[in-house]
Image: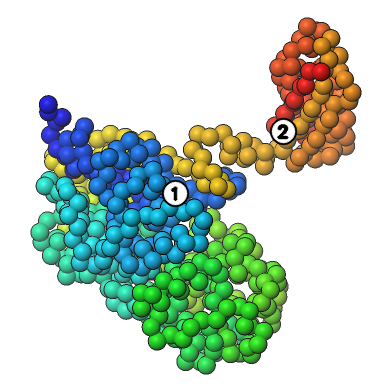
Amino acid sequence: MTTGAADFVFVPFGGVGEIGMNLALYGYGPPKARKWLMVDCGLGFPGPELPGVDVVFPDIAFVEKIAKDLVAICITHAHEDHIGALATLWPKLKCRVFASPFASGLLEVRRLSEPGAPKIDLLPARAGSVLDLDPFTVEYIAVAHSIPEAHALAIRTPLGVALHTGDWKIDPEPGIGARIDEARLRTLGDEGVDALVCDSTNILREGDSFSESDVARTLRTLISEATGRVLITTFASNVQRLRAIAEAAMECGRTVVVAGRAMDRVVQVARECGYLDGIPGFHSPELLPTLPREKVVVIATGSQGEPRAAMARAANNEHPSIKLGPGDRVIFSSRTIPGNAREVHRVINNLCNLGVEVITDHDHLVHCSGHPRRGEVAQMYDWVRPKTAIPVHGEAHHLTQHAAFAKTKGVDQVVPARNGSLVRIAPGAPGVVGEIPAGRLFKDGDVVLREDDGAVRERGKLSYAGVVSIALAVDKKGDLVGDPDVVFAGVPKRGKFGEDMGEVVDEALFATFDGLPRARRRDADAISNAIERSVRGAVFSVWGKKPIVHVMVVTV
């Protein structure tokens, strides 16, 4: 029985039209009998429109359906937006996972710290690895990034080659880890690349990225010039930065203290992988009271203003060991991720109120991105010379600008994909040939909710207009028994002209109940619906907002 001619396709489920939550499929074979390869399995972070949600995952309902044909998951690198969903989603798939030693180490350390986390079948892959994942052959190619062991993937099928760049930059002096393998990429370009699936994060910025070595020199100067305690907050995963800070501290005769569980996990794995060889062991914050202020550097989590992180607690003067004041220097060796500006500014303002000197990337070169600017993207196109460009890893503006830029580099075809786009790479003309459902999952406490679950949407309404809860008892004759119980949450006590909100609700409640025919008063649903509408309207008339109204009727 024929199932049609084979094709080579690409389907992103996250990270295309947004930054974060990266997960993509490559497929090869006849449309009804394809084999699939997954690249990355990352999470995203919720905005204020998702109150109470901890993290966001791609919805992999489609992947679950084709799980028997999923040959493997290949991880490009260990950032949370590329591996953070693996522990939650892998049990639905249970396929092989290939990852570098550093990424595998971080996944295992996290598993050991989280009761009930699954034991994932992790298989090794590193720069130069060539994996036979029939019908795919996957080659891991070294790239520089803001975390050790980042890779691009050359994905080969009988119909062609796709280069999936992952996150990358061109850094001649990355500090630790590999530089981008220009020679291998040039050779790949000579052999022929059908599609370049490329990072778009910094496509709006001209020129080339700064080097980690530039940042290291700046940090060394700022630490050596400091007269009091130095606290530096940075992304925990940036091992290059951690090593640069530690080396600068050693040169200045300062002891390094590390604060934050995420930082502790990264340091443990970095030492196991040899990235902190020659660096003395770091100390815990409990040692701080015994150290002279001018002889210490604290590396802390919380660069994004996370309220429970060490940085925010220190800024609020609530950390049990980290105490800051006039003469101390705090360095934000990081960038503020879009959506986190308010929280970061709050931390900075609190530090200023303590009399602390605050330095950010607006003041000195204390941070550089791990993503390529336009000049570096141009070099990638010059090396690889793809037939087709598929911009990924960016919001709509990034993707649109990247598409236009690719055309200036002489790329024949540019495919404007979004999450859920079924993109044909080969054979024939490349383009979007279908759509696959690609929603989101919400991690809400210990529960994973689908995007269409009403809980989060209703929580948003609660945060906007509060809730009125009413409980009343009715006998079999349809008469009230006792007084109704009314509870407000998030509703003002008085209306626009000073009306007592409790009286407004009571008046609407009793008037509605008394106005119901006796037959309807014996129907709990009829009572509930009528009182909900009446109370909502009454509150709106004196407040201008409609709260959620819950009415529970008990028949006695």
| Of the pair 133 and 335, the residue shown nearer to us | 133
How many neighbours does mark 2 have within 10 angstroms: few (below 14), some (14-19), or many (20 or more)? many
The earlier-in-sequence mark between 2 and 1 is 1
Residue located at (26% from left, 63% from top): 125
Residue located at (29% from left, 77% from top): 172
Residue 201 vs residue 507: left or right? Answer: left
What's the amino acid at mark 1? Thr
| Callout 2: SS | loop
Q: Which residue is mark 1?
A: 88
Look at the image and tell me whether residue 468 can be seen. yes
Above/below status of 179 relative to 202: below
Inter-mark Cα distance, 2 to 1: 35 Å
Quadrant housing residue 273: bottom left
Residue located at (26% from left, 53% from top): 197
Q: Which residue is mark 2?
A: 547
| Callout 1: SS | helix
What's the amino acid at mark 2? Pro
Label tally: 2
